[in-house]
Every structure is written in C-alpha cells, then in structure tokens.
Image: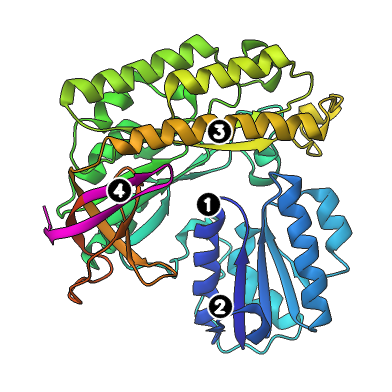
C-alpha cells in the first residue's frame, strides 16, 4: 500500500502527520512521492480559515476522480464532517490513531501485521513515535488544545481543552532526537505559556520545562510556538535570555491594534499591555547585546472594525517593527462566538487593509534584516532552493541563501556565514567556516 499525506494548517498538524506516517509504515505502507502515485491519501485538515477548507473540498473532488482511497483527519468542524462523510472513505479523530489500522482494514486497505499497540489504556496519541520529516529539525508537542475561546477561533472546538504532556515524556523524546544528531527542537502548543506538566505531585511550568531541556547535553537550538500575550510572563522572558541554546524568537499574535476590537475578540489584554511585553523583550535583548526577532498575527476586517480601529493596527505595526506578520482577512467560522456577529466589512475593504499592512511589514522587515549586512551569522543548513543554492536559517528563523558551495557543506550542519545582501524575507551570504559552537 502506497500512501501520501497532504497536510493543511499549523505546525501541530504537521507533527500529527508525522505520527500518522509512522503508523502507516508500521503496517506496511510506503510513502509515495505525490498523491497521484498513492493508493491511499490522508488529508490532515485545517478549519481555522475558510480558504483552507475550500482547498480541502477541491482536493477531495480531484482525488475522487482518480479513484483514490481518501481518509480525513485534523481540525474538522462538525458541519464539514457531515458534508464530507459520504465523499471520503474514512474520517477519524487524531486521538483515535491507535485504532487506525483496524479502521483502514474495514475500508478495504490491504495492511500488514500491525505493530501498534491498541490497548485502551493508551489514551494520549502523542505516545506514538513520529516519523520525523527531518533528521536535523523536529517538532515536539508539549500540549494540545486551547482554553482561551477567542471569538474568531475554532481551535477549542476542534482540538478540545488544554492538556499538557508529561515533562518526562517531552524530555524523553527530546533526548532521543539529540542522540540522533537533531540540531533544532521546536516545542509546540496552541499556547505554550500556559503549559502545566506534572512530575508526581510537582507542577512544572513552561519556564521550568525550558530549563530542563537546555540542561541536556549537546549543541542545539530550542524554540517554541505559539505564545499568548496574556500569559507571557517576565519569568519566561528572563528564561529565554538565560541560555544560548534558546532561540530569541517570539511569535506573539496581537490580532488587532484596537482595544475595542481586542475586547470583542475576547483576547484578554489591551494594546498597552502588549507594548509593555515587547518593550521588556527588547530591553532584555539590549541588555544582553543579543539580537531578537518578533513576529505576530493580525486579522483585518473583524466584524465592526472601523477605519479608526484599522489605523490603530497599522500604527502598532509601524511602532513595533515586526520581523514577520501573518496578516489574514477575517472569515466567519461556525461554532465561534464571532459567527453571531454581522460580517459587515466588505471584501474589497479587507483587501485594501491587508495590502496596507503588507506594505508596512515589507518596510520594517527589510530594515530589520539590513542590520545583518556585513555581519557574521550562525546558520543551520536546511537544504537547497529551486535554483540550486544552499539554503539555511538563523536561530531567529531568518532565511539565508548561500552563494558559495565548496561541495563539502551538508544539510543539518551549522556554518558561519557573512551576510552580503538583505531583503524583507531573507538574507544572502557566503560561508566562512563550519561552526558547531
């Protein structure tokens, strides 16, 4: 049986797909290069935005024409599940992954002897070993679900409430990755700041978990996504700057620069609180003389957003000077509180507002990247781009194109690079020497 997994959405979905791939290979599956060459296509769905859902529907239509066996999982809303259940062969919740071999057999998929324990005692699907897509960089989930119920977001409805993974299991997975030469660990959670793991009767918070991981031997980078502003503490900021292993990269979604809109979104903070957090991060970076990168998410056209509300978002972007921003037009999602609001900002206005923020981002990202010109940067080699140039990333997730290739450079290695060019979305440099420190 040849399989292909098409993943939509966030890094958590990507991590889930790695666990699905492990299960499929344990029952004799072989990964196909693309959907056309596969017998079985698994679609890991994202329902956060309607545009992603539209792509899923289009893909299913195409796969049905090719007479593929189609399996759906991921963040699937009940309304979409109902519409799609007769169009695909199987829909399963990722938490049911232990039962996947049996479910596949029922729909006529030829499978080998399952090596997966399906004991009812195994309740946490994160126990499944992932088939990592990279040997040098790995996602490690530390929690699932969300308790925040932002007015526009479906995550609590499709992912459930927050459940923190055992710190010992996180450490165990990380140790195995490092022993195999992994160079970058990315901790995942919808809101990592609210992590509350347990060791016996002792509760471990996120700062403590970070300290436990960086105490492990080896030369590696540790980063995390995503953080919620209302839970990002002074303690966590100090922890991030306490170790060279922790990447000084903060993805901190603001969503709007208007307090009125933030209240309607049920975000739980005000703009001034957000600004103070950014000030503390930048102050700590300045004190330690360390570069820091800050990215964000912003929604334009949230119901009742006025020109004044939007201009506050634009002003905030100009003030903070984000390295990256993921700017999305609001789309109403079923089940959410905001779905009861009238979507009264027309699409043309949303597009114009989005475009204006893109222009601000272009300027601030370019200016931020120009700081690296003629400086040295430590870069993790991640592969080759479409034109054959070596590609890498800094600890701040800055993309780097390498101009020189001595044929000795290998993917997964650290190198020192001199930056010779900067654009809004990346850097260009030349390798100076290999660097494991």
Q: Say whether residue 420 is magenta.
A: yes
Q: Give the range drawn in magenta.
A: 419-437
Which quadrant of the view contains residue 370? top left
Q: Which of marks 4 and 3 is nearer the N terminus?
A: 3
Position of 195 with respect to 38 (left or right) is left
- How crowded pointer 1 is (Cα within 10 Å; few <14, some 14-19, many 20+) is rated as many
Which quadrant of the view contains residue 297? top right
- The residue indicated by pointer 2 is 24
Whole-number angstrom distance, CA of label 1 to CA of label 4: 33 Å
x, y percentage for residue 303? 78, 23
Which secondary structure type mostly characterizes the magenta part of the structure?
strand
Please determine whether, in this image, residue 41 is positioned above or below residue 120.
below
- The residue indicated by pointer 1 is 12
* Mark sitting on residue 359: 3
Compare residues 129 and 265 and report the one nearer the observer.
265
In this view, the mark in front (1 or 4): 4
Q: Earlier in the sequence, mark 2 or mark 4?
A: 2
Whole-number angstrom distance, CA of label 3 to CA of label 1: 29 Å
């Amino acid at each position: 049986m040849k399989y292909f997994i098409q993943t939509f959405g966030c890094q958590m979905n990507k991590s889930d797909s790695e666990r699905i791939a492990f299960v499929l290979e344990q029952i004799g599956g072989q990964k196909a290069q693309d959907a056309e060459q596969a017998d079985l296509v698994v679609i890991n769905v994202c329902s956060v935005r309607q545009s992603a859902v539209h792509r899923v529907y289009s893909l299913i239509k195409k796969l049905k024409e090719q007479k593929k066996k189609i399996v759906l999982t991921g963040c699937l809303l009940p309304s979409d599940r109902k519409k799609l259940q007769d169009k695909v062969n199987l829909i399963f919740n990722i938490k049911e992954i232990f039962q996947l071999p049996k479910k596949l057999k029922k729909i006529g998929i030829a499978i080998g002897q399952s090596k997966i324990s399906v004991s009812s005692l195994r309740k946490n699907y994160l126990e499944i070993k992932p088939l990592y897509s990279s040997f040098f960089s790995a996602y490690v989930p530390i929690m699932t679900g969300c308790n925040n119920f932002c007015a526009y977001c479906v995550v609590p409805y499709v992912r459930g409430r927050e459940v923190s993974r055992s710190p010992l299991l996180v450490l165990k997975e990380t140790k195995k990755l490092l022993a195999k030469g992994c160079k970058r660990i990315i901790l995942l959670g919808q809101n990592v700041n609210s992590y509350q793991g347990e060791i016996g009767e002792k509760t471990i918070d996120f700062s403590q978990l970070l300290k436990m991981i960086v105490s492990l031997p080896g030369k590696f980078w540790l980063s995390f996504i995503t953080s919620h502003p209302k839970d990002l503490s002074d303690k966590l900021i100090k922890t991030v700057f306490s170790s060279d292993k922790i990447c000084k990269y903060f993805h901190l979604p603001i969503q709007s620069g208007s307090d009125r809109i933030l209240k309607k979104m049920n975000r739980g903070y005000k703009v001034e609180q957000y600004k103070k957090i950014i000030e503390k991060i930048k102050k700590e970076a300045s004190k330690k003389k360390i570069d820091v990168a800050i990215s964000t998410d912003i929604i334009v056209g949230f119901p009742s957003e006025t020109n004044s509300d939007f201009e506050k978002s634009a002003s905030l972007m100009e003030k903070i000077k984000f390295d990256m921003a993921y700017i999305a037009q609001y789309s109403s999602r079923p089940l959410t509180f905001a779905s009861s609001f009238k979507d009264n900002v027309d699409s043309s206005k949303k597009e114009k507002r989005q475009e204006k923020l893109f222009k601000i981002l272009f300027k601030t990202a370019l200016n931020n990247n120009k700081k690296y010109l003629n400086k040295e940067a430590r870069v993790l080699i991640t592969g080759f781009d479409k034109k054959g140039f070596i590609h890498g990333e800094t600890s701040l997730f800055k993309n780097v194109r390498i101009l020189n290739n001595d044929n000795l450079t290998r993917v997964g290695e650290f190198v020192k690079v001199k930056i010779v060019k900067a654009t809004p979305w990346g850097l260009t440099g030349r390798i100076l020497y290999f660097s494991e420190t």
